[in-house]
């Protein structure tokens, strides 16, 4: 099983999960044209995709979904709440799923779980092949027991580290945005993400990638320090998903 990122952050997200001939694009917050370009840089084309899986309806996760789905006839997997927010002309492509039920897309097992975030029916995922699991968690304001259980024992974690609380406090965001970002339905700060890493079973972890970093309210060095302390590992083992470049394919063995 392998995974890659087309880019991660408030200006667009897209994650690739691949097993055998099955490749899923989780979210497409880039224009279809931009996503096609970024896919090509990863050695893929949109025509190779098996499906698009959508976490929630915020623009940084769905901007390119409509055009990409229609152009390449791709099924779009979304919860009923998220699907209701997508353009009417993608309705024919929608496969609704429940946040509480595992399902399969060809070679990949998809285990969704609900998360607290200010969207209609947001979901995050664990993707598996029967042997190894990749956990994805971004756009989450607070950690729940469901999240802890879902992400325990994964071989790879793609985990939001959105902001450093002090940088957010001292930054120039208007107050309402500071409250939204740091609220229970907002985004995870570095301390929350690090606490999660300390709490769950990471004994099988082969890859840890920090996701959805704020370009204004966080810095990769702070995240690297926090995550390496939480996992008691070397700093160079911590990966950071870049807004412009994402990260290239990583294999789980
Ligand atoms: Zn987002
Ligand atoms: Zn969001």
Image: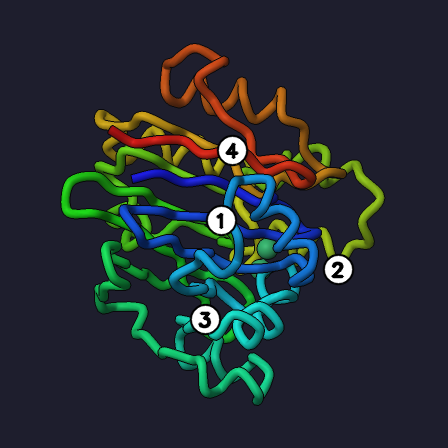
How packed mark 2 is, by other alpha carbons closer than 10 Å (few <14, some 14-19, many 20 or more), is: few
**Mark 4 or mark 3: whose residue is earlier in sequence:** 3
At a point 67% along the width and 33% down the height, the residue shown is: 218
How packed mark 1 is, by other alpha carbons closer than 10 Å (few <14, some 14-19, many 20 or more), is: many
* Distance of label 4 from label 2 (alpha carbons): 35 Å
- Depth-wise, is mark 1 or mark 3 nearer the camera? 3
- Depth-wise, is mark 4 or mark 2 nearer the camera? 4
Identify the mark at residue 248; answer none if there is no mark. Answer: 4
Residue bearing the label numbered 2: 176
* Distance of label 2 from label 3 (alpha carbons): 37 Å
Residue bearing the label numbered 1: 15
Badge 2 vs badge 3, beta-carbon distance below 8 Å: no
**Mark 4 or mark 2: whose residue is earlier in sequence:** 2
At a point 54% along the width and 52% down the height, the residue shown is: 14
Q: Is residue 89 left or right of residue 83?
A: right
Place of residue 198 in the rendered image (x, y in percent of width and height, measured from the top left): 34, 28
Quarter occupied by the C terminus: top left
């Amino acid at each position: 099983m392998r995974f890659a990122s087309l880019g991660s952050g408030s200006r667009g997200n897209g994650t690739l999960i691949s097993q055998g001939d099955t490749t899923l694009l989780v979210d497409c917050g880039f224009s279809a044209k931009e996503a096609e370009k970024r896919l090509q840089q990863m050695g893929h084309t949109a025509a190779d995709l098996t499906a698009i899986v959508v976490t929630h309806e915020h623009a940084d996760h769905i901007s390119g979904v409509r055009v990409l789905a229609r152009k390449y006839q791709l099924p779009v997997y979304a919860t009923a709440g998220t699907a209701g927010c997508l353009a009417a002309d993608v309705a024919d492509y929608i496969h609704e799923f429940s946040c509480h039920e595992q399902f399969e897309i060809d070679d990949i097992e998809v285990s969704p779980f609900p998360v607290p975030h200010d969207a209609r029916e947001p979901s995050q995922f664990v993707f598996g092949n029967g042997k190894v699991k990749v956990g994805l968690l971004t756009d989450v304001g607070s950690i729940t027991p469901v999240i802890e259980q879902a992400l325990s024992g994964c071989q790879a974690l793609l985990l939001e580290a959105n902001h450093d609380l002090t940088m957010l406090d001292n930054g120039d965001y208007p107050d309402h945005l500071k409250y939204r970002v740091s609220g229970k339905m907002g985004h995870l700060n570095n301390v929350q993400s690090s606490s999660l890493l300390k709490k769950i079973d990471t004994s099988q972890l082969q890859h840890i990638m920090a996701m959805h970093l704020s370009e204004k309210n966080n810095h990769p060095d702070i995240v690297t320090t926090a995550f390496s302390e939480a996992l008691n590992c070397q700093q160079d083992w911590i990966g950071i998903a870049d807004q412009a470049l994402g990260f290239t394919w990583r294999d789980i063995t």
